Image: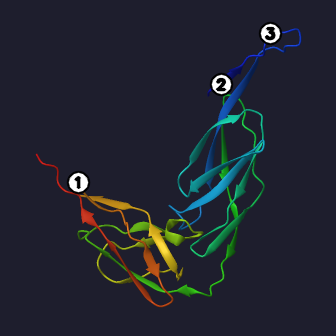
Amino acid sequence: MSSIQLSASRSPLAVSDVTRQFADVELRLADEPGMDGASVRVELRSAGKCQPLELVFGQPLLVKNLLVGQSSTLNVLPTCINNIILSHLSKPAVLIPAANKTLRHTVSFLKENSDRSGLVEVNATVLGLPKGCQAQRYVFRSNRGAGMFQYSLMLESDTDLQHVAIPMYAGYYALKPASLHQDEQCWFSDFSASYGILQSTNIITLPFEKEPDLPL
């Protein structure tokens, strides 16, 4: 815990020195099946200030240096993950940190199914990985990574064409970089190109490369 010492000027009207105490808050998204790795953007509002935050499913976020005893509220920015809209908290979130403690708060949402018109079927294939690799999760985000639509998808790690279980909205998607380790070797992809999902049946290809062996 950090503190800032504010000293009043010495005068007949001066008040005693005031110590402002600060504490931390740990925020965590309530577990939602199939949404690991996807994220929700929220705003932490306190005393007229707004701090933007991004919370990731499965990963707690520690927010430091909130003023002890001062209330803060959370406001969610609407997002749609796996065609489920998250736009409102299930109950108001009022955070009041106490001295010498980390306040832990779980953020939960009201859920609403999105409009299914405009959804398209997608098939995928994964290239460059050795046989025997386990399936892994990929997170797509619309508008080249800046949009409100996200998909957290489990895909097999082989070259067979596989049908994506969740239909997707058309658009251009960014994909988070991924890596996979097997037999003390690493395969990776930064997925630098955006993926276009068009108003038709789509096939997307996810290429991996083997990390070069280090010289002995």
How far is mark 2 from mark 1, CA to CA?
45 Å
**Mark 2 or 1: the one toward you:** 2
Looking at marks 1 and 3 on the same chain, the residue that comes earlier in the sequence is marked by 3
How far is mark 2 from mark 3, CA to CA?
22 Å
Sort mark 1 into few (<14), some (14-19) or many (20+) by Cα contacts within 10 Å: few
Q: Which mark is residue 202?
A: none
Q: Which residue is mark 2?
A: 3
Element marked by disc 3: loop
Element marked by disc 2: strand
Which quadrant would residue 14 be assigned to in this image? top right
Q: Which residue is mark 1?
A: 184
How far is mark 1 from mark 3, CA to CA?
66 Å
Which residue type carries mark 3?
A: Arg
Res 118 visible: yes
Q: Which residue is mark 3?
A: 10
Q: As displayed, is residue 81 above or below residue 203? A: above
Sort mark 2 into few (<14), some (14-19) or many (20+) by Cα contacts within 10 Å: few
Which quadrant would residue 19 be assigned to in this image? top right
Q: Position of residue 21 (x, y in %)?
A: 70, 27
Q: Residue at x 66, y 28 (%)?
A: 100
In this rendered view, identify the residue nearer to me: 202 or 100. 202
Which residue type carries mark 1?
A: Glu
